[in-house]
Amino acid sequence: MLRIGLILAIAVLVADQVSKWYILYEVGLPQVGHIPLFAWGPFGFDLTMVWNRGVTFGMFAGDGLWTQIALGVMALAIAGFLLRWMARAENRLTALALGAVVGGAIGNVIDRARFGAVADFADAHAWGWHWYVFNVADAAIVIGVCCLLADALFRPSGGGKDQTP
């Protein structure tokens, strides 16, 4: 299971870094700031440049070097724990979900090391309400965590055997 999780982690990492390179250097979003892409009824999707100096949803944000180092070290430690879990994964869904989280976490750590913040740019909105601006790594992390939760909640226990005494 480790191999399949690592393959997805690498794919997420590459997709994340390529998308950020394209947005930052080819599109020039830091200079432009905002590009509306499409609106369909109450739904829309735009490119909006945000430098996230915190973790999920901007929590624990700080501009200081030590804050960024601490957040990076914490993310790498979590990725190490998840890699160990991935090596012991019981099924493909768990290995893939962990791979998505690891790839996304490492992608965001690379941003912190390069820029001192994470480059976020995907801006989904509906009925005038905007979700937090995110990137490929963030999406992979959220999808991976949702898959882990679904697996924990809905996987039959005991290999499908009746557990009644």
Image (cartoon, grey):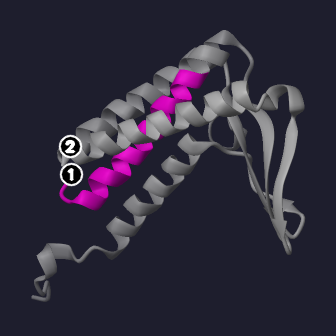
Q: Is residue 7 above or below residue 124?
A: above
The residue at the point 40 percent across, 68 percent down is 150
**The residue under label 1 is which amino acid type?**
Ala
Q: Earlier in the sequence, mark 1 or mark 2?
A: 2
- Left or right side of 77 for 72: right
Residue 61 visible in image = no
The residue at the point 90 percent across, 64 percent down is 128
Q: Residues within 10 Å of mark 2 (few under 14, many from 20)?
A: some
Mark 1 touches mark 2? (CB < 8 Å):
yes
**The residue under label 2 is which amino acid type?**
Leu
What span is in magenta? 90-111
- Left or right side of 24 for 128: right
Q: Nearer the viewer, residue 86 or 92?
A: 92
Q: Is residue 55 above or below residue 132?
A: above
Q: Is residue 9 above or below residue 97?
A: above
Residue 24 visible in image = yes
Q: Is residue 51 above or below residue 123?
A: above
Q: Which mark is residue 2?
A: 2
Disc 2 is placed on an element classified as helix
Q: Position of residue 103 (x, y in %)?
A: 42, 38
Quarter of the figure with residue 12: top left
In front of the other: label 1 or label 2? 2
Quarter of the figure with residue 54: top right
Quarter of the figure with residue 158: bottom left
Where does label 1 land, which residue? 89
Q: Position of residue 37 (x, y in %)?
A: 81, 53
Q: Which mark is residue 140?
A: none
Q: Position of residue 139 (x, y in %)?
A: 56, 50
- Left or right side of 79 for 18: right
Q: Dividing the image into 4 quarters, which one contains the C terminus?
A: bottom left
Residue 6 among magenta residues: no
